[in-house]
Each structure stands twice: as structure tokens, then as C-alpha cells.
Amino acid sequence: MGKIGLFDLERHFAFYGAYHRNPVNILIHMLFVWPIFFTTAVLLYFHSSFLRLLISLQYWAGSLAAMLCLACWVSGSLLAKHLGFSLAWKVVLAAQLFCWTGQFIGHGVFEKRAPALLDNLAQAFLMAPFFVLLEALQSFFGYEPYPGFHASVKAKVDAEIKEWKDTKGKKTS
């Protein structure tokens, strides 16, 4: 697929979407990605060098994602302050283990494909919350960042999956 431009939303979505086609796996990600982000914010409360996320891929959904990130950061900070480090890291560890286990079960059992983070760690972590947000907005409200977005992404996802299957087939033969 080559290098993806920072603001090429369709290519980012197609990359991530090619790893998430099974409806059960998509639901698992919708349930667990934001808790992973939230509990990471709890843990990062104890590190003053936390870099702020700036989501500028699409104005409306990006603004919603920024509000969700801010809500995670603020509520995570409040929870961390309330719990203190000795309890917060245990809560975070339990939540992260639970959510990551769900993610890997989704990929292993339902998707039957390794997670995107094994192929592109940074893209997978940075894109996951935005991806599940747009998936939810599209599924429940028919939202598209612009007309034709989902049709274009679907074509790119299909091409990604075909390329992956062709490559996988060559390795097994």
C-alpha cells in the first residue's frame, strides 16, 4: 500500500478497515477502543510529558473525537487523582488486559486476521479511536465525512483484503 499521507482519511480508513470487516470484531472494537484510550489517559495523568492529540482529519467528526479525547483526559485525570497511583495502575492494568483480550479475540476468532497494530503500530493506535467513532456514526446515523466517502473506502478495503489474501496465498503455496 505504501506510505499513507497524514490527512488522507480514505487511505487511513481503508488500511484500518481491511483489518476490521467482521461485524462482531467491529462491535468488540467499538466497545473496547475508547476504554483503552480512557485508561491510558488515567495512567498518563502521572506523566507530565503527555503529548496532546490533535485530530484534524475531518471537522465535524474530528471535533467530536477531540471532545471525546478531552472528556477521557479530564475524567481520566479526575479518576487518577481520586484513586492515587497505587490503585490507579491496578485498575488500568485490569481494564487494559480485559479490553486488549477482547480485541485479540475479535481478530483471532472473528476476523481471522492479525490486528493492524502488527503491521503499523503508530497508525493503528492513532487511527483506532477515530475509526470506531466514524464506524459508529456511519452505522447509527448514516454519517459520511463527505459524499461517496464510504463507497470509496469500501473499494479500497476490498483491494487491501484482496492484496492481503493474494500475499497470504503465495506464502502458503
Image (spheres, rainbow, N blue to C red):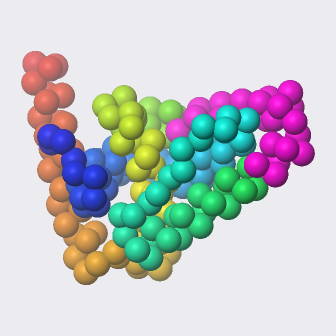
- Write the residue at 19% across / 66% down: 152
* Residue 14 appears left or right of 72: left
Which of the 4 quarters of the picture holds residue 70? Answer: bottom right
Label the magenta part by its dominant secondary structure. helix
- 89 in magenta: yes
* Residue 5 appears left or right of 169: right
Point out residue 116 in the picture as x, y percentages from the top left corner: 36, 37
Point out residue 51 in the picture as x, y percentages from the top left corner: 54, 44
Is 138 above or below relative to 111?
A: below
Question: In front: 109, or 47?
Answer: 47
Q: Is residue 110 visible?
A: no
Is 28 above or below relative to 149?
A: above
- Write the residue at 66% across / 30% down: 97
Identify the magenta region.
77-103
Question: In front: 3, or 27?
Answer: 3
Question: In front: 109, or 42?
Answer: 42
Q: Looking at the image, how many numbered discs can be counted on the residues? A: 0
- Write the residue at 13% across / 30% down: 167
Which of the 4 quarters of the picture holds residue 172? Answer: top left
Point out residue 163 in the picture as x, y percentages from the top left corner: 13, 40
- 39 in magenta: no
- Write the residue at 28% across / 69% down: 150
* Residue 166 appears left or right of 142: left
